[in-house]
Amino acid sequence: MSIADNIRHFEQELAGTNCRLVVVTKTHPVEKLQEAYTAGARLFGENKVQELVAKQPELPADIEWHLIGHLQTNKVKYIAPFVHTIQSIDSLKLLQEIDKQAIKNNRVLNGLLQFHIAEEETKFGLSLSEAEEILQSEAFRALRNVQLTGVMGVATNTDDESQLRREFRELRSYFDLLKSRYFADQLAFREISMGMSADYALAIEEGSTLIRVGSAIFGARNYGTH
Ligand SMILES: *Cc1c(COP(=O)(O)O)cnc(C)c1O
């Protein structure tokens, strides 16, 4: 199946749901991104700042770019002029830097709090208590140009369906709790970013509003030659 076929397949799968597709374009050349764009995709996700900064000017301006990988504070400035949503916020320090750069660029940047839901130690993300500590702080209340729009998580790399469901439900429960405690009056806080190529169908069933899909659209990534 072509990239366009795959995009259409996801469009059909998501029709009538509350969930949107973020096309994960990391490692793929801009020609392939252009193919996805021509087929109708508008939300693109990259995990590295350098790659995102290189590709963005080569593609149409109405793409909504999401950063989905770990972000160092000293790199926020490179993406602040154009990025739509930073999905991988895992510290107050990072939120403050995003706010600072957003103000400099006279923009509001959207962000998701990334939670650690996987078994693996290596995956980044907050615990619920860490997130609440941030949200209750004076420093958080002082932020002006960063808008939190929801939560994000990466599930364990496993085909154990019950474990995946457990992790997705955990993330959803964090969303529900934060929504009711801190964002009850904010319509913008509405995203639960979960589900990738191998587990997106389960994630949609568990309430995902943003699936992040790469290899099911572009085929396997080749990390060796890019
Ligand atoms: C690479 C990546 C994805 C997409 O993975 P696929 O298995 O190719 O769909 C989703 N989320 C994050 C955070 C990623 O780094």
Image (tube, helix red, strand yellow):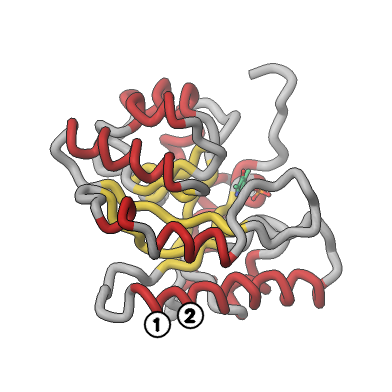
Query: Could you tell me residue 159's position as x and y percent?
Result: 84, 64
Cβ of disc 2 within 8 Å of ligand 1? no
Residue 54 figure quarter: top left
Query: Could you tell me residue 222's position as x and y percent?
Result: 72, 28
Residue occupying image coordinates x 71% and y 26%: 223
Residue occupying image coordinates x 49% and y 25%: 51
Q: Is residue 104 left or right of residue 21?
A: left
Q: Nearer the viewer, residue 154 or 76?
A: 76
- Circle 1: residue type: Ser
Query: Could you tell me residue 156's position as x and y percent?
Result: 77, 58
- Circle 2: residue type: Asp
Q: Nearer the viewer, residue 5 or 198?
A: 198
Q: Is residue 105 left or right of residue 77?
A: left
Label 2: state its secondary structure: helix
Q: Which residue is mark 2?
A: 176
Q: Which residue is mark 1?
A: 180
Residue 62 figure quarter: top left
- Asked if the residue under mark 2 is in contact with the one under mark 1, i.e. CB atoms within 8 Å, the reply is yes
- The answer to whether residue 36 of the structure is visible from this angle is no
Task: In the displayed orientation, state which residue is furthest to the left.
Answer: 106
Tell me if mark 2 has few (under 14), some (14-19) or many (20+) residues whose alpha carbon lies within 10 angstroms of its own: some
